[in-house]
């Protein structure tokens, strides 16, 4: 798995400021992360984006390293950390090839970033890379969308509306097509931007997302030296069931 494959799937992150505007206030994943965090080690956040979780973790006194492949997202995170007056090490790295000077008791990756690992090889490489950067018994927490078959069986078309960072009205038309052979959903967005009811811009972008099934996840975790401590259907720690939107995994590295 090469870095270029990941870089070809980053259109959604072209505007870090807009991404921050839309998602920065989301905090439902923070509570569970805090339950497993220790002040004794530097904590590793993978796919940290604009620092949505990295910064509040640092504000609570945790030593943090934030890793992301997108330099624009990291630059936004650095500016926010400076404004928040916290010290965080942010590094641009491929999560399948981590090269960090620390080992931690906790690494985590949220925001369904796990779905960017589109192949079995890249998923294995991610786990192996994390394994190398955890102490014995260290914990890896991550989430991914639950592959609810009735939702993936047909082309999913839907509309979203919101106000962007400039006060403009945005209408997005989404079209998601799932490939049952590759388990990858091709998600396309057509965006129309209005100011005072006048169309001022149109944009298009896309992203590919891999869906993994619960039994598949069990094999992946075990094959790479981890055990599942708990799996939830959401960040509120509700049980996973067939219709859950998410799968949230708490995995512990097996000791020798």
Image (cartoon, grey):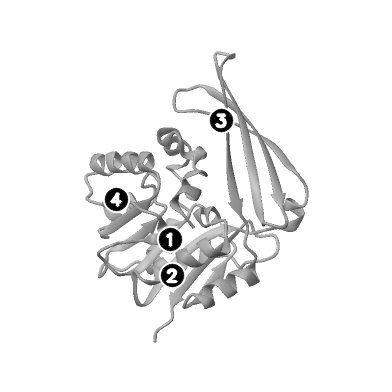
Query: Can see residue 235?
Result: no
Q: Are circles 2 and 1 on residues that touch, CB within 8 Å?
A: yes
Q: Is residue 126 left or right of residue 217?
A: left
The residues bearing labels 1 and 4 have C-alpha atoms spaced at a distance of 17 Å
Q: Is residue 170 above or below residue 36?
A: above
Q: CA distance from mark 4 to mark 2?
A: 21 Å
Judged from this view, the residue extending furthest toward the bottom is 256
Reading the chain from its start, which is encountered first: label 2 or label 1? 1
Q: How far apart are the two marked residues, 1 and 3, measured between alpha carbons?
A: 34 Å
Tag 1–tag 3 contact (CB < 8 Å): no
The quadrant of the image that shows the C terminus is bottom left
Q: Please give the label number shown on residue 90.
A: 4
Q: In the rendered image, which residue does mark 2 sit on?
A: 128
Q: Position of residue 214 (x, y in %)?
A: 63, 68
Given this view, does label 3 or label 2 mark the residue nearer the observer? 2
Q: Nearer the viewer, mark 4 or mark 2?
A: 2
Looking at marks 3 and 2 on the same chain, the residue that comes earlier in the sequence is marked by 2
Identify the image quadrant of residue 210.
bottom right
Sequence-first disc among 1 and 3: 1
Foreground pick, 23 / 133: 133
Q: Nearer the viewer, mark 3 or mark 4?
A: 4
Residue drawn where x is 57% and y is 56% of the image: 118
Residue sitting at x 40%, y 55%: 94
Q: Are marks 1 and 4 in contact (CB under 8 Å)?
A: no
**Mark toward the start of the polypeptide (3 vs 4):** 4
- Decide if residue 58 is in sight here: yes
Q: Residues within 10 Å of mark 3 (few under 14, many from 20)?
A: few
Residue pointed to by mark 1: 96
């Amino acid at each position: 798995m090469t870095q270029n494959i990941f870089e070809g799937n980053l259109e959604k992150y072209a505007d870090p400021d807009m991404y921050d505007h839309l998602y920065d206030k989301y905090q439902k994943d923070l509570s569970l992360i805090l339950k497993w965090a220790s002040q004794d080690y530097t904590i590793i956040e993978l796919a940290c984006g604009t620092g949505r979780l990295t910064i509040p973790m640092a504000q609570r006194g945790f030593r943090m390293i934030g890793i992301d492949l997108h330099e624009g997202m990291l630059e936004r995170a650095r500016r926010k950390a400076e404004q928040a007056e916290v010290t965080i090490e942010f590094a641009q790295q491929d999560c399948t090839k981590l090269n960090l000077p620390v080992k931690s008791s906790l690494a985590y990756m949220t925001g369904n970033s796990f779905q960017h690992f589109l192949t079995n090889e890249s998923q294995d490489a991610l786990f192996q890379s994390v394994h190398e950067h955890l102490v014995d018994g260290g914990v890896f927490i991550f989430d991914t969308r639950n592959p609810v078959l009735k939702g993936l069986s047909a082309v999913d078309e839907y509309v979203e509306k919101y106000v962007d960072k400039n006060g403009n009205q945005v209408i997005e038309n989404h079209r998601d097509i799932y490939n049952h052979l590759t388990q990858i959903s091709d998600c396309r967005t057509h965006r129309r931007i209005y100011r005072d009811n006048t169309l001022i811009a149109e944009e298009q972008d896309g992203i590919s997302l891999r869906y993994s099934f619960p039994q598949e996840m069990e094999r992946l975790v075990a094959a790479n030296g981890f055990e599942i401590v708990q799996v939830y259907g959401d960040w509120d720690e509700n049980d996973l069931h067939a219709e859950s939107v998410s799968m949230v995994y708490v995995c512990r590295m097996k000791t020798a």
